[in-house]
Amino acid sequence: VVANVPYDPAATTFSAEVAEVAAAEPDAVVVIAFQEGTTLLRSLIENGLGPGEVSVFGTDGMSLGSLGPAVSE
């Protein structure tokens, strides 16, 4: 584990948290979240930490029937 970055689930942006994760240069990212996870995942993708760049794992709390479209086209 290169970083353990807590976040406020009521936040509307996660720029600082994603920057902290990016600075750690992870091989994979694990997102433990609920519906706010879509915003967090979108921010990860926008900052080069999406599934195209590193392995991304999530919890079942984010399994909304529309997770993919909610995160990215």
Image (cartoon, grey):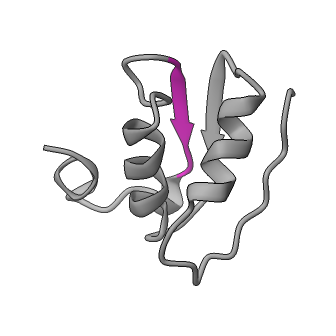
Closer-to-camera residue (13/8)? 13
Residue 48 picture location, percent across and down: 45, 28
Q: Quadrant of residue 29?
A: top right
Please state the extent of the stretch shown in magenta in the rendering. 54-59
At a point 65% along the width and 44% down the height, the residue shown is: 19
Q: Is residue 21 above or below residue 25?
A: below
Question: In the orientation shown, which residue stands out farthest toward the bottom?
Answer: 10
Please give left or right for residue 10 compared with residue 52 in the image.
Answer: right
Q: Is residue 19 magenta?
A: no
User: What count of labels does the image hold?
Assistant: 0
Please give left or right for residue 2 compared with residue 73 in the image.
Answer: right
Q: Is residue 72 above or below residue 29?
A: below
Prevailing secondary structure class for the magenta stretch in the rendered image: strand
Residue 1 picture location, percent across and down: 87, 27
At a point 46% along the width and 37% down the height, the residue shown is: 47
Q: Is residue 48 above or below residue 13?
A: above
Residue 34 picture location, percent across and down: 52, 67
At a point 50% along the width and 30% down the height, the residue shown is: 49
Q: Quadrant of residue 52?
A: top left
Question: In the orientation shown, which residue stands out farthest toward the left?
Answer: 73
Residue 60 picture location, percent across and down: 50, 54
Please give left or right for residue 60 compared with residue 24 in the image.
Answer: left
Quadrant where the C terminus sits is top left
Please give left or right for residue 5 compared with residue 47 in the image.
Answer: right
